Amino acid sequence: MIFDMKLKAADKGSMDAALLPWRSVCEIDEIGIIYLPTGEMVSGEDGEEPVMEPIEGWHVNVRTMLQDAADALRYIEVTPDNPVRVWL
């Protein structure tokens, strides 16, 4: 079984600490800070551009086949409605 997980921690240090025991058994896609449009637009060099705002936390996608790793990381797993990046 493959476990694809979207994880969110308070910051990079917290995420690194959570992943440390599992780095050898997981594929890790580090996203970092995610920026989303606020709905507001501003004039830029190339015309109108959306104003972007960071959302809270440090974000990582993890893929593992190890049940123990998936279970251990569940405490920081999130289920976003519209993920910005997913495993293919």
Image (cartoon, rainbow, N blue to C red):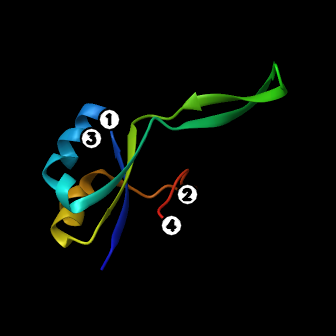
Q: Which residue is mark 2?
A: 81
What is the CA distance from the residue labelled 3 to the residue labelled 1?
8 Å
Identify the disc placed on residue 15. 3
What is the CA distance from the residue labelled 4 to the residue labelled 3?
23 Å
| Of callouts 2 and 1, the N-terminal one | 1
- Residue at x-position 50% and y-position 67%: 88
Question: Is residue 13 placed above or below 42 in the rendered structure?
Answer: below
Q: Position of residue 80 (x, y in %)?
A: 50, 55
**Which is in the foreground here, disc 1 or disc 4?**
4
- Residue at x-position 26% and y-position 72%: 65
| Of callouts 3 and 1, the N-terminal one | 1
Inspect the image, locate mark 4, and give the three-letter code of the amino acid beneath it.
Leu
Inspect the image, locate mark 1, and give the three-letter code of the amino acid beneath it.
Ala
Q: Quadrant of residue 24?
A: bottom left
What is the CA distance from the residue labelled 4 to the residue labelled 2?
17 Å
How crowded pointer 2 is (Cα within 10 Å; few <14, some 14-19, many 20+) is rated as few
Q: Position of residue 20 (x, y in %)?
A: 16, 46
Q: Which residue is mark 4?
A: 88
Left-right relation of 51 to 30: right
